[in-house]
Image: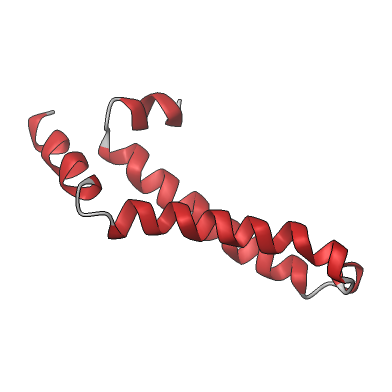
């Protein structure tokens, strides 16, 4: 459902993705505080997750072509 919303450039999908990725960064950060994730190999998963979520958020908010498309679409609907 969110993928379709992003595909059709719906504003609600933009914000849902932003909230999900921010929550994912918090969760992966929490995992890094757990004792099971002390080894370098075990830390790789959460660190890659944080990196991918940060890239997604950066693309959504820092790319000048993304946000105007979503805001323009919301005023038409």
- Residue 24 is situated, as x and y percent measured from the top left of the image, at 59, 56
| Residue located farthest toward the left when viewing the structure as drawn | 76
Give the side of residue 19 with respect to residue 15, left or right.
right
Give the side of residue 50 with respect to residue 44, left or right.
left
Give the side of residue 32 with respect to residue 35, left or right.
left
Image quadrant of residue 43? bottom right
Which residue sits at x=31%, y=57%?
61
Vertical arrangement, residue 23 with respect to residue 68, above or below: below
Which residue sits at x=16%, y=37%?
74
Image quadrant of residue 44? bottom right
Vertical arrangement, residue 7 with respect to residue 75, above or below: above
Q: Along the line of sight, which residue is nearer the eye, 10 or 46?
A: 46
Image quadrant of residue 31? bottom right
In the rendered image, the quadrant that contains the N terminus is: top left
Which residue sits at x=21%, y=41%?
70
Vertical arrangement, residue 39 with respect to residue 17, above or below: below
In the rendered image, the quadrant that contains the C terminus is: top left
- Residue 60 is situated, as x and y percent measured from the top left of the image, at 34, 51
Which residue sits at x=34%, y=43%?
14
């Amino acid at each position: 459902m969110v993928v379709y919303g992003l595909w059709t450039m719906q504003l609600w999908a933009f914000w849902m993705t932003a909230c999900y990725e921010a929550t994912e960064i918090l969760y992966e950060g929490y995992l890094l505080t757990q004792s099971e994730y002390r080894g370098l190999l075990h830390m790789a998963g959460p660190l890659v997750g944080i990196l991918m979520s940060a890239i997604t958020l950066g693309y959504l908010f820092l790319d000048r072509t993304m946000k105007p498309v979503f805001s323009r679409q919301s005023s038409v609907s």
